[in-house]
Image (tube, helix red, strand yellow):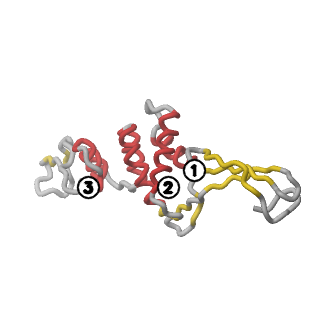
Amino acid sequence: MRCPFCRHADSRVVDSREADDGQVIRRRRSCPECGRRFTTVEEALLLVAKRSGVTEPFSRSKIIAGVRKACQGRPVDEDAIALLAQKVEETVRARGAAELPSHEVGLAILAPLKDLDEVAYLRFASVYRSFDSLQDFEHEIAALRAGVRGEQAEDAPLATAPPVARAGDKNEGALSTA
């Protein structure tokens, strides 16, 4: 490591400490040439590949912002949201990849969010999975009631819905429950 004061090409590590739950290493260094000390910070860079093909650094604040929107009006405090974001970051970093698709970050958010608040989970899942119809919501609610994840509940029965008249049915006056 080059000394920032005299530009000498070598330095000696005096002390190393972990910071931010082990995600960052702070090293105290000494220059053998000028004798001055300085600190360096090392962090493993985690990149997120978006659907558009653009890559950007992982951002815990983006996780917090998205979950905060889903939890708006719900009895969820900021500490719980910050803890969820930390869990998500630990989960994606534990995979050991330097770059991961944004889809995997979204999946890593869904499980702890479901444990935190089911309504917030449903809100987040509806945007993340691009729900197009009431049936998508009914399917996800049925999966929540059954205690399984939405992508595993393809054959789960739909939640009980009030009867609805459908245009174009054989018996137009008849009611349907699907």
- Label of residue 93 in the image: 2
Residue count near mark 1 (Cα–Cα under 10 Å), binned few <14, some 14–19, many ≥20: some
The 10 Å Cα crowd at callout 2, few under 14, some 14 to 19, many 20 or more, is some
Tag 2 or tag 1, which sits nearer the N-term?
Answer: 1
> What residue appears at the point 44 percent right and 60 percent down from the top-left corner?
103
The local secondary structure at tag 1 comes to: loop
Query: Within 10 angstroms of label 3, few (less than 14), some, or many (20 or more) residues?
Result: few
Report, in whole angstroms, how far the alpha carbon at label 1 lies from the one at label 2. 9 Å
Per the image, the residue denoted by label 3 is 152
Depth order, front residue of 130/46: 46
Q: Do the residues labelled 1 and 2 touch (CB within 8 Å)?
A: yes
Q: Residue 115 in the image: x percent, y percent?
A: 36, 40
Residue 23, label in figure:
1
List the single residue furthest toward the bottom.
Answer: 53
Name the one closer to the observer, 160 or 30. Answer: 30
* 159 horizontally vs 74: left or right: left
